Image (cartoon, helix red, strand yellow):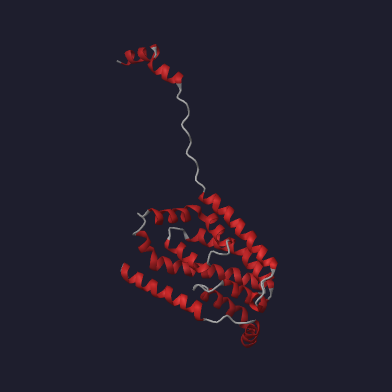
Amino acid sequence: MSGRTKLIVALAVVALFVAAAVVLPIPGPAQLRAWAAATGPATPLVLFAAYSVLTVAPIPRTVFNLAAGLLVGTAAGIAIGLVATTVAAGLSFGLARLLGRDLVTRHLHRSAVRTVNDRLSGGGVLAITSLRLIPVVPFAPFSYLCGVSSVRLLPYLAGTLLGSVPGTVAVVVLGDALTGDTPPALLACYGVFALAGAIGLVKVFKKRAPAEPGPPDLLADANSTGPTATLDRVREA
């Protein structure tokens, strides 16, 4: 596809994802239990597939983590949440790279674009992990951003998995947002995760001060112009 065609397709896909995130209703606990009863033993597989595909769109992962804990229990819910998160992150990354990477490459001469690209790609696993820890950083849009940047796939997936562990565990274990309540312990966890992510970002974005030039070596300068140096030059001549 040409660059213009890719841009049009990318905009259409983003619009579709946003519409899906707005239009699709969030099921309540009773609906989830009825759905699980209907699917029977296939519930974990169906949940995994839905989680992996639907969170490619900007649909909050929290809903699926809560559903996982409610439907399949804590241990299985955490496992499904983490694996599905990694799969969804990989799909989002690949889709964004396919449709949007060429557009970003053409604008790398711009300082703002180059700075963001260099920080993400140079930060590696630590940068991705830190940003995934911060709750206010949306999962899908950040995946798209990484996809159009120069971030390599393996560090991106590793950082996504590591950064998603605390939040996934906290929501599956402590979450009750489907009933309209958010436990204070979950809010405290979010605060700790955000702090940890901020500390990681400081380490990633901190610029090393250039080393100051030391004092001139006066002895060396003297030797270079003294009698010995003069005699050496005469010998060389």
User: Is residue 97 depicted above or below 117 in this figure?
Assistant: below
Q: Write down the quadrant of residue 63 in the picture.
A: bottom right
Residue under the point 63% across and 63% down: 190
| Image quadrant in which the N terminus is located | bottom left
Instruction: Tell me which corner region of the image, top left, top right, bottom left or bottom right, holds residue 222.
Output: top left
Q: Is residue 138 above or below residue 43?
A: above
Q: Which quadrant is the C terminus positioned in?
A: top left
Foreground residue among 63 and 53: 63
Q: Residue at x 59, y 53 (%)?
A: 199
Q: Position of residue 191 (x, y in %)?
A: 63, 61
Left or right for 97, reference 180: left
- Seen in the picture, residue 52 relative to 37 is either above or below; the reply is above
Q: Nearer the viewer, residue 161 or 12?
A: 12
Q: With 222 as the anchor, is 187 left or right in this view?
A: right
Residue at the location (46% across, 78% down)?
A: 19
Q: Position of residue 42 (x, y in %)?
A: 61, 82
Q: Is residue 71 left or right of residue 136?
A: right
Q: Nearer the viewer, residue 182 or 168?
A: 182
Q: Position of residue 79 (x, y in %)?
A: 63, 70
- Seen in the picture, residue 39 relative to 131 is either above or below; the reply is below
Residue 47 in picture, x, y percent from top left: 59, 78
